[in-house]
């Protein structure tokens, strides 16, 4: 609630009104000779890629109070330099707006990097994976969990309970697909979870059953089934969660990223939201963050309302107590962090809803409609995981990934003004496994960037770590044009976009996805001074070099949050 002035006008409006009145008075009786403001920081003598509406290239930027005071040529900007102004001579170097990753999972990314999960990404054979699990089992006391993440095979019968039992019967074990949506448990883990031949499939999930044994085969599809096991596994403690988060954001800052959206922030893991809120409050968080807590499908329909904090029945009260008290005590921090809610319609890999008869959608269409209605009424933004074409069709109010939409879906996206958050770097990392998608008659193409832009559909970009192994945004900027897999297969080059367009998606497009296009995403007067100095110029280097460009300085609101060791500045 705003503080009310004696006249009854909200204090913020009151101040605005009085300062306007003062300006008018000045304008009326004083010769117009505005004193030039003094900048705190000036970047000069560089190539400033502004990403403004006309793609202006400037040469210098002045910063005051964390915002862009002015942008233009070096001479114009030099007017803002005073004795106490910090001046950085860019020496011809390139500056862009801070890059925005519109889809990541930061604490999980940090946990993958620091060894909480055994990381299986990049392992090419089943033997290699089973070996790594066996080595982990040797070092793990009996009875303790082995939690592995990163199976990259799309096959949902890649592993089974017996494979894992051969590794160990004295450790409970869960091995999860890289996207996190499905996985495999050994007998010990199934036993702890109480899963046997009589256990029914949870809504939206599936427990794999072997026909020959009439028993669970270890395969668990979708979060509701995985969660039957996961709820028995240890969670990282408060310090581990905070360390994982800070580790992840520092890695991002070092790659020129100034803002990250966490699209699978779990309300059921209180240490994670404590880590986010506490690091922001204490000033340790170097980047801007938006959180999109996941609404599990097990809580459908009416119960979704409880997630809007109108009741405490969705999550055990103890788990969201912190969040509710943050909302009350620190509304500004809460509002700056809060994005909206995240939902999922399908899984990934073999589980994506490509009119695949075996894929299990997480919601029925009726549930989806109901949930959207509730979110809409409560004024919450919604972001949705929808990968397969059927899933994309189901969900065209707000959308993510959209790997292979159908031609008519893309027309609907345009009509409904959805923002597509996609990941061109996946073409490089995983494209070799997807060549089947390319041949589908009804699909417009895989990550059809040109088709989106042609229809004026806003494209945002995010790397999606740890689901995708490479978090560096340079790979997205490169692959948005190159569309080439690790093995050299080139996906429909006509769907490629220019580096200028790719940079716009990774800045303005992602800002738009967070409803922040007026505050961040370009270097324009009045916007936040989120900028990056790079060691090379994205616009003039050969396309294949884009992936290797390094951030020398990253700044958020004019404050330097990363400085590379090789940098010539300071
Ligand atoms: Zn994701």
Image (tube, rainbow, N blue to C red):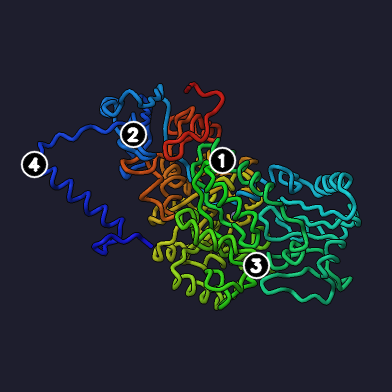
Which of the two marks, 2 or 3, is nearer to us in this view? Answer: 2
- Closer mark to the observer between disc 1 and disc 4: 4
Q: Is mark 4 within 8 Å of ligand 1?
A: no
C-alpha gap between disc 4 and disc 3? 74 Å
Mark 2 surroundings within 10 Å by alpha-carbon count, few (fewer than 14), some (14 through 19), many (20 or more): some
Q: Which residue is mark 1?
A: 252
Q: Secondary structure at mark 2?
A: strand
Residue 29 - label: 4
Helix, strand, or loop for circle 1? helix
Mark found first going from the N terminus, 1 or 4: 4
Q: Are marks 2 and 4 in contact (CB under 8 Å)?
A: no
User: Which residue in the structure is indicated by mark 2?
Assistant: 57
Give how far apart the Cα atoms at labels 2 and 3 are: 48 Å
Q: Position of residue 283 (x, y in %)?
A: 52, 43
Q: CA distance from mark 2 to mark 1?
A: 25 Å
Q: Using the numbered discs, state the Cα–Cα distance from disc 1 to disc 4 in whole angstroms.
A: 51 Å
Q: Nearer the viewer, mark 2 or mark 1?
A: 1
Q: Which mark is residue 356?
A: 3
* Residue contact at pointers 4 and 3, CB within 8 angstroms: no
Q: Earlier in the sequence, mark 1 or mark 3?
A: 1
Q: Nearer the viewer, mark 4 or mark 3?
A: 4
């Amino acid at each position: 609630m705003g503080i009310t002035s004696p006249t009854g006008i909200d204090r913020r409006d009151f101040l605005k009104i009085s300062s306007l009145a003062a300006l008018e008075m000045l304008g009326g009786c004083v010769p117009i000779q505005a004193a030039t403001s003094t900048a705190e920081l000036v970047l000069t003598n560089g190539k400033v890629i502004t990403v403004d509406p006309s793609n202006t290239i400037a040469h210098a930027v002045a910063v005051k109070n964390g915002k862009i005071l002015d942008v233009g040529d070096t001479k114009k900007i030099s007017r803002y330099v005073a004795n106490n102004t910090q001046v950085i001579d860019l020496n011809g170097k390139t500056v862009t707006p801070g890059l925005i990753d519109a889809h990541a999972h930061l604490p999980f990314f940090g946990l993958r990097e620091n060894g909480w999960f055994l990381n299986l990404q990049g392992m090419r054979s089943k033997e290699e994976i089973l070996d790594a699990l066996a080595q982990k089992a040797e070092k793990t006391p009996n009875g303790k969990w082995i939690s592995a993440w990163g199976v990259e095979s799309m096959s949902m019968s890649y592993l089974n309970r017996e494979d894992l039992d051969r590794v160990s019967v004295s450790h409970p074990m869960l091995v999860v697909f890289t996207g996190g949506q499905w996985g495999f448990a050994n007998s010990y883990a199934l036993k702890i979870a109480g899963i046997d031949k009589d256990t029914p499939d949870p809504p939206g999930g599936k427990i794999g059953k072997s026909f020959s044994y009439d028993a669970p085969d270890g395969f668990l599809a979708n979060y509701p089934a995985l969660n039957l096991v996961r709820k028995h596994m240890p969670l990282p403690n408060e310090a581990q969660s905070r360390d994982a988060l800070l580790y992840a954001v520092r890695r991002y800052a070092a790659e020129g990223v100034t803002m990250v959206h966490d699209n699978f922030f779990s309300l059921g893991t209180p240490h994670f939201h404590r880590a986010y809120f506490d690091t922001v409050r204490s000033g340790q968080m170097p980047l801007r963050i938006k959180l999109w807590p996941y609404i599990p499908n097990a809580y459908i329909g009416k119960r979704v309302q409880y997630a809007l904090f109108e009741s405490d029945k969705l999550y055990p009260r103890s788990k969201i107590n912190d969040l509710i008290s943050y909302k009350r005590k620190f509304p500004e921090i809460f509002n700056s962090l809060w994005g909206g809610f995240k939902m999922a319609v399908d899984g990934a890999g073999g589980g994506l809803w490509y009119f695949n008869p075996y894929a299990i959608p997480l919601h029925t269409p009726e549930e989806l409609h109901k949930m959207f209605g509730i979110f809409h009424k409560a004024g919450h933004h919604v972001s949705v995981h929808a990968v397969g074409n059927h899933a994309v069709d189901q969900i065209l109010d707000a959308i993510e990934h959209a790997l292979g939409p159908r031609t008519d879906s893309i027309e609907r996206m345009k009509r409904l003004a959805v923002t597509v958050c996609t990941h061109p770097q996946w073409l490089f990392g995983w494209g070799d496994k997807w060549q089947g998608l390319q041949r589908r008659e009804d699909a417009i193409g895989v990550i059809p960037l040109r088709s989106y832009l042609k229809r004026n559909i806003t494209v945002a970009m995010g790397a999606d770590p740890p689901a995708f192994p490479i978090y560096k945004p340079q790979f997205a900027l490169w692959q948005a044009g190159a569309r080439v897999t690790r093995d050299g297969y080139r996906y429909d080059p006509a769907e490629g976009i220019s580096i200028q367009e790719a940079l716009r998606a990774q800045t303005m497009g992602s800002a738009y996805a967070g409803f922040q296009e007026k505050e961040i995403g370009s270097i324009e007067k009045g916007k936040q001074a989120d900028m990056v100095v790079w060691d090379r110029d994205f616009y003039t280097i050969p396309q294949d070099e884009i992936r290797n460009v390094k951030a020398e300085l990253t700044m958020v609101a004019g404050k330097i949050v990363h400085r590379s060791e090789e940098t010539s500045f300071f």
